[in-house]
Amino acid sequence: QVQLVESGGGLVQPGGSLRLSCAASRSIFSINAMGWYRQAPGKQRELVAGIFGSSSTNVPASVKGRFAISVDNAKNTVYLQMNNLNAEDTAVYYCNAKIGPYDYWGQGTQVTVSS
């Protein structure tokens, strides 16, 4: 079991950047994989970045080059760096951890891109 707490969301102008943080209640080394998902109103939740083995990452083509995931093992924290944001990036962003067959989710943090 793990608790996940996201932070760093907010309102940003188009073209701006944000860094989201996800603090885990246990060592990242003990977690099979972690990722960031987002869900916009009326849309399905989608993966925007994943990391496993502390170094192997998966970033979908839709956000590749703008989004990057990283880990600070000493702080048990996963980050999502988002650059060149646009209105289509507006969504609630969720942190996810996979431990064995189980998925754990944070409470979500709102990201709004608007001028």
Image (spheres, rainbow, N blue to C red):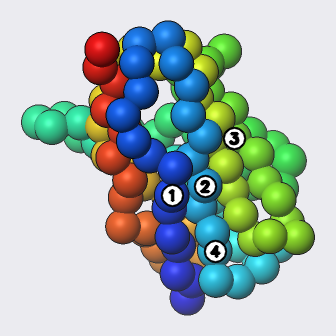
Going 57% across and 25% down the picture, which residue do you hit?
17
Disc 1 residue type (three-letter): Ser
Q: Residue 39 bears which disc, if any?
A: none
Q: Nearer the viewer, mark 3 or mark 1?
A: 1
Mark 2, secondary structure of its residue? strand
- Position of the N terminus by quadrant: bottom right
In the picture of the structure, the residue carrying the numbered disc 2 is 21
Please, which residue is most extreme toward the left here? Answer: 42
Asked if disc 3 and disc 1 are in contact, CB closer than 8 Å, the reply is no
Please indicate whether residue 79 sits to the left or right of residue 4 in the image.
right
CA distance separating discs 3 and 1: 14 Å
Q: Residue 24 bears which disc, if any?
A: 4
Going 50% across and 11% down the picture, which residue do you hit?
15
In the picture of the structure, the residue carrying the numbered disc 3 is 69
Asked if disc 1 and disc 4 are in contact, CB closer than 8 Å, the reply is no
Asked if disc 1 and disc 2 are in contact, CB closer than 8 Å, the reply is yes
